[in-house]
Image (cartoon, grey):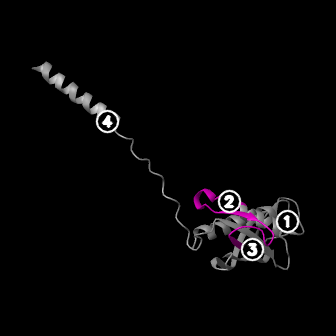
Amino acid sequence: MVKKKLLTLAGVLAILASGACLLPPLPRHKPPPPPVLNGLDGVSRIRVEVVNSSPSHHLEPVALAQKVAEAINQQTAKTKINAHAAIASEGGDAVLLITVLSETVESTAAARARSVTLYIKDSATLKRLDDALAWQETEVGNPITGDIGDEKVPDVWKSPGLVDRVSQALSDRLAFRMLYRH
């Protein structure tokens, strides 16, 4: 009797095992595409242009455009949007125009202070090639704290590497606001 039960159980297990092996594999599920960002649907390649209209003109437009493009491209895996710094009339399906309005030193204790706060005010507009507005911000203030080192620097902006650090911070903030805050 026990032999019959064991034989029956073995037969059932064999049938189940062979039946399970003959079934087609389960379908693989692809992850859903990233959410379309408000106003940025249909935008996959952005041309970044920068104009520096501040009286002091410390930030170099071409270098800042490159930094902004790099900041946007760091998010490409999530957003599927690429950017490149360019001169007018070069490729892309949207144009991000950034205008630096002012570059001022907001606070410094003395010329030999190690840390200063720079205040950059800018406006940015992202338009599709058909002139439809995709994103915009006006007169945004960006306080950026920078270290000017131990040496006396009569002009804070000439502190080694400071302009590059300011450009990087400004670019990262602008890309984040454009891609994730609507």
Q: Which residues are magenta?
A: 70-96
Q: Secondary structure at mark 1?
A: loop
- The residue beneath circle 2 is 73
Q: Pick whichever of labels 1 and 4 is earlier in the sequence.
A: 4
Under circle 4, the secondary element is helix
Q: Residue at x 34, y 39 (%)?
A: 23
Quarter of the image where one finds residue 8: top left
The residue that disc 1 covers is 112
Q: Are marks 3 and 2 in contact (CB under 8 Å)?
A: no
Q: Position of residue 84 (x, y in %)?
A: 74, 63
> Residue 150: x and y, percent?
84, 58
Q: Nearer the viewer, residue 150 or 125?
A: 125
Q: Sequence-wise, which precedes: disc 4 or disc 3?
A: 4
Earlier sequence position, callout 3 versus callout 2: 2
Q: As shown in the figure, which amino acid type bears the numbered disc 2?
A: Asn
Residue 36 falls in which quadrant of the image? bottom right
Q: CA distance from mark 2 to mark 4?
A: 46 Å
For the C terminus, the quadrant is: bottom right
Instruction: Tell me the mark number nearer the camera, choosing from 2 and 4.
Output: 4
Q: Which residue is mark 4?
A: 20
Residues under numbered marks 2 and 4 in contact, where contact means CB atoms less than 8 Å apart: no
The label shown at residue 119 is 3
- From the viewer's side, name the closer residue of 25 and 35: 25
Residue mark closest to the camera, 3 vs 2? 2
Looking at marks 2 and 4 on the same chain, the residue that comes earlier in the sequence is marked by 4
